[in-house]
Image (cartoon, rainbow, N blue to C red):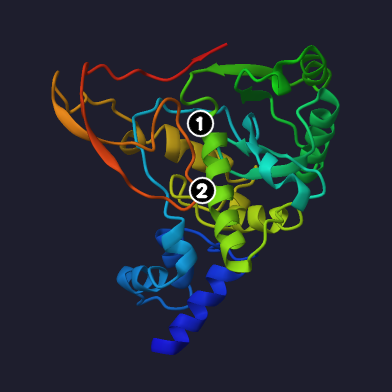
Amino acid sequence: MGKALDTFLEKIYYSLNSPASYAGINRVYEEARRKYPKLKLKDVYDFLHRQRVYTMHRPLRKKFLRMTTRPSGLHTDWQADLAIFDQLTEHNDGYKYLLVCIDVLSRKIFAVPAKSKSSEDMIDAFENIFKLSKEILPHKLYTDRGLEFEAKRMKEYFKKKNIDKRVVYSPDVHASMAERANRTIKERLYRYFSEQNTLRWNKVIQKIVSGINASINRTTGVSPNSVTFKNAAELFNRLYKDPKNIQIIKQAPYSSQDKLFVSQKKKGNLKRDIYPTTLTNCFAYILKTTIDHPSHIS
């Protein structure tokens, strides 16, 4: 395959409309196998590690156990969060934020820019979100406790829309699925920034999101775009009723006073790694073995 394969991989990796656009190794591999069924994962690994933007923006991973988020059906439960781009405002027509909503069952993402956290701008952003969803509104909407979601005017707005607005209480997790969507968007955007030598995101964000929605989701095994009201029940049963997919919380594999490596980059609340990363580790002691189960939901 040689040069022809590299040319094809470059096309699907650097094209904004591609499901593999500025994505990780598994996403690129699955997309490339559509044309090259005998392709090996190592071929994609080698290709990506020759790409400057991929090696610069490989994220640090911090995995921990979470309780399963279980929706009632398609578009019954959404999560929302704000992605912050305040340092890039002058390059993006005054937009500082990206409102991101994700359907819990299908993992479909809807995202629109917002200029501020004011209720007026947030209501405009949600109205644009609902236009993208073709006026499909969730029954429940989960967010963190930020005033951009919890202000009096916002509560009145959600009530008028017949949306049951709920808050996820956790200093680390917040609305974790929406935050994960934010990270995916930012990973792809910042690779795009590095490759195209630009800081302008508001004109390409819909292409980025479109590529994500067209790609196979690792958890569901299907693309968000492929989930419809006709096949949603099948996906729900597979994800939440199949015994093979039921999550079992295991005991933490540490004992008191165990030593381990902890990245110095990770302190306090979870941060999302979208800038070029440098791994620096130090020794620390484990003081307890308790796993704090996330979030009490109001």
Question: Alpha-carbon neighbours of circle 2 within 10 Å: few (<14), some, or many (≥20)?
Answer: many
Amino acid carrying label 2: it is Ile
Identify residue for label 1: 176
Badge 1 element: helix
- Residue sitting at x 70%, y 43%: 111
- The quarter in which the N terminus is drawn is bottom left
Residue 183 showing in the rendered view: yes
Return the residue nearer the eye: 279 or 293.
279
Residue 1 showing in the rendered view: no
Residue 209 in the image: state x and y as whole percent: 65, 52
Toward which corner of the image does residue 38 lie, by quadrant? Answer: bottom left
Toward which corner of the image does residue 131 lie, by quadrant? Answer: top right
Identify residue for label 2: 274
Return the residue nearer the eye: 239 or 272.
272
- Residue sitting at x 71%, y 16%: 150
Question: Alpha-carbon neighbours of circle 1 within 10 Å: few (<14), some, or many (≥20)?
Answer: many
- What is the distance, in whole Å, between disc 2 and disc 1 at their CAs? 17 Å
Return the residue nearer the eye: 189 or 238.
189
Amino acid carrying label 1: it is Ser
- Residue sitting at x 77%, y 15%: 155
Residue 43 in the image: state x and y as whole percent: 34, 74
291 left or right of 91 in image = left
109 left or right of 266 in image = right
Residue 135 in the image: state x and y as whole percent: 81, 38
Return the residue nearer the eye: 138 or 149.
149
| First in residue order: circle 2 vs circle 1 | 1
Q: In this view, does 216 lie above or below 285?
A: below
